[in-house]
Image (cartoon, rainbow, N blue to C red):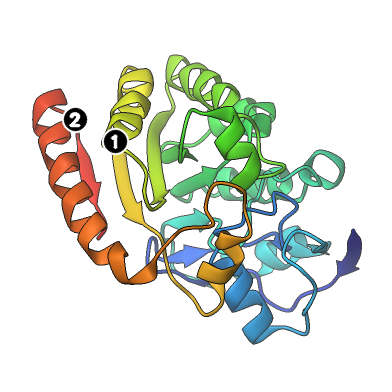
Amino acid sequence: MIIREIEVNSILGKSSIGDYCINPYVGCIHACVYCYADYYTKKFSRHQEEWGEFVDVKINAPEVLLKEISKKKKGIVYISSLTDAYQPLEAKYGITRKILEILARYDWPVIIQTKSSLVLRDLDVLKKFSNIKVGFTIISLDENETRRLEKFASPPKERVKALKILKENGIKTFVFIGPIMPFTRIEEIERIVEETKEFSDEFYFDKLNLKPGLIEKIRKVEGFEEIEEDKMEEYYNKIKNGILSLIEKEKIKARILF
């Protein structure tokens, strides 16, 4: 694992989800096989290492944010778009916590999306916001499958437990079911909804974001060797219909992103 401490000139980036995004790190130890951030990171940085084998820690991010926040118009901040702000290194560096403390001080609205139960460490800070949502990415409740695809992320049971604790503490929550892998069965998606609907205010569903080389990378994972790209459109059309029926049946607030 290559870990570098770097300094940055800016930390508030543009976002299609909120008004801004903050990525406290470059790279991610979670090493998710399907992650499209790998493509963008290699495209726009010097990194050519395998995804999950490097992380740059933006060591001065809190200080930079403090300067930027006084100059920019208040808006929704999405944490994070190209990394997991609560990957294991956050336990050591606390960059995300320091960022949240600043955003809470100025009461900027925040959306956090993660695969880590470490977010519970910052529950005291999260409760200071007047407008915050925290969500967990869950692709499956099968720990064998998730361990193959999300090598170092928190087990799905831990994420569900953390979701429950956040909800009990008055935090708005969501579950992001995605990427839905070809060919995830609708029964597995139904299972995720059933296990989390009591603790989630909203659900999002998305398909695999295909970037160059990603299919080949996924095919190297045991159990996914036979994925056929030319059959994916048919699969996603079918699974989308199943999700629409699920939303209607469960009466959940949800958005399908494909």
- Left or right of 163, for residue 11: right
Which of the two residues, 80 or 183, is positioned nearer the viewer here? 183
**Tag 1's secondary structure?**
strand
Crowd tier of the residue under label 2, counting other residues whose Cα lies within 10 Å: few below 14, some 14–19, many 20 or above: some
Q: Nearer the viewer, residue 116 or 141?
A: 141
Residue in the foreground of this view, choosing between 45 and 133: 45
- What residue is at 45 percent from the left and 47 percent from the top? 111
Q: Amino acid at mark 2?
A: Ile
Q: Is residue 240 above or below residue 35?
A: above
Q: Amino acid at mark 1?
A: Glu
Dot 2 and dot 1 residues touching (CB under 8 Å): yes
Q: Which residue is mark 1?
A: 202
For image coordinates 48% across by 51% down, the residue present is 108
Residue 4 in the image: x percent, y percent? Answer: 90, 66
State whether residue 144 is above or below residue 218: above
Give the labeled residue for mark 2: 252
